[in-house]
């Protein structure tokens, strides 16, 4: 079945550091891929998405590229801020029909000033 | 903006009680979802609905039921709450026209 594996946290960085959160997936065909973010005390919100191979999603300085050959969708940001402290979830929606999302377990990021 | 609201942010119930969690969305979305979120396990889908009066089991439906009598409202029911149902419950909605699910703020349920 479909699955998403993302790097275990927690991740702690200093402000302005470079961030990478790894995400790999298992799915048939060409799923849509997502990163959601959950700020403290809130629900999840979409951060970025990509729907086909080699697409790059970007938002708020975050980027992720859909790599079919490595089945990956790693999240990156060049310079993190304290306000980026949150839990980040990688997710996929399988190709062709189902509206369901499959989520990774989440990675908690803490950015210190 | 899409808004998904959940009836309570925090809820404390006793073992054996019947518990209702309500979710309302204001964007006329066809799809609605209930997840539970637990540390180290991420989000797991309990039930979802594609239309009024329609429901399908997710990955962990045991101990739960749902009701969707109106398009905007999706209720999660714990028939007889147990301590292992202590968790954060998240509701979401989406439209087939776009990939994005929109989430409510969550209900943190504690069963004593």
Image (cartoon, helix red, strand yellow):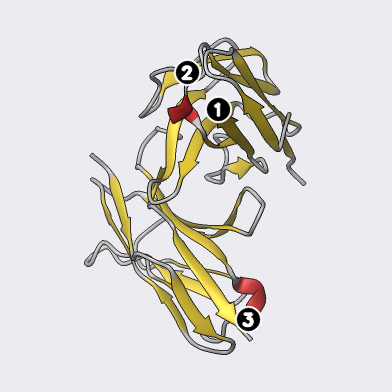
Q: Which mark is residue A32?
A: none
The C terminus of chain B - image quarter: top right
Q: Under tag 2, what secondary structure?
A: loop
Q: Nearer the viewer, residue B103 or B62?
A: B62
Could you tell me which residue is drawn at 44 percent across and 33 percent down?
Answer: B45
For label 1, the crowd category at 10 Å Cα-Cα, with few meaning under 14, some 14 to 19 and many 20 or more, is: some
Is B85 placed left or right of A5 in the picture? right
Could you tell me which residue is drawn at 39 percent across and 52 percent down?
Answer: A105
Q: Is residue B58 above or below residue A19?
A: above
Tell me the distance, in whole angstroms, between the alpha carbons under discs 1 and 2. 14 Å
Tell me the distance, in whole angstroms, between the alpha carbons under discs 3 and 1. 37 Å
Give residue A1's quadrant in the image.
Answer: top left
Residue picked out by circle 2: B64
Residue picked out by circle 1: B111
Residue farthest along the bottom direction in this orientation? A16
Q: Nearer the viewer, residue A99 or B34?
A: B34
Q: Which mark is residue A81?
A: 3
Q: Under tag 1, what secondary structure?
A: strand
Q: Is residue B71 above or below residue A46?
A: above
For label 3, the crowd category at 10 Å Cα-Cα, with few meaning under 14, some 14 to 19 and many 20 or more, is: some
Q: Is residue A19 above or below residue B67?
A: below
């Amino acid at each position: 079945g479909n699955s998403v594996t993302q790097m275990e946290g927690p991740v702690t960085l200093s402000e302005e550091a470079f961030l990478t959160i790894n995400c790999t997936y298992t799915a048939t065909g060409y799923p849509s891929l997502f990163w959601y973010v959950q700020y403290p005390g809130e629900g999840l919100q979409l951060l970025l998405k990509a729907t086909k191979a080699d697409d790059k999603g970007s938002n708020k300085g975050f980027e992720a590229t859909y790599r079919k050959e490595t089945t990956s969708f790693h999240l990156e940001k060049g310079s993190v801020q304290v306000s980026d402290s949150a839990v980040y979830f990688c997710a996929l929606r399988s190709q062709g029909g189902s509206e369901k999302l499959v989520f990774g377990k989440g990675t908690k990021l803490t950015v210190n000033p | 903006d899409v808004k998904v609201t959940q009836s309570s942010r925090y809820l404390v119930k006793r073992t054996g009680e019947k518990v209702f969690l309500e979710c309302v969305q204001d964007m006329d979305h066809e799809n609605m979802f209930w997840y539970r979120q637990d540390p180290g396990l991420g989000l797991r889908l309990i039930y979802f609905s594609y239309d009024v009066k329609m429901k399908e089991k997710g990955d962990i439906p045991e101990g739960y039921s749902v009701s969707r009598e109106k398009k905007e409202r999706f209720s999660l029911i714990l028939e007889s709450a147990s301590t292992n149902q202590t968790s954060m419950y998240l509701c979401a909605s989406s439209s087939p026209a776009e990939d994005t699910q929109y989430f409510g703020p969550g209900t943190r349920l504690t069963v004593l």
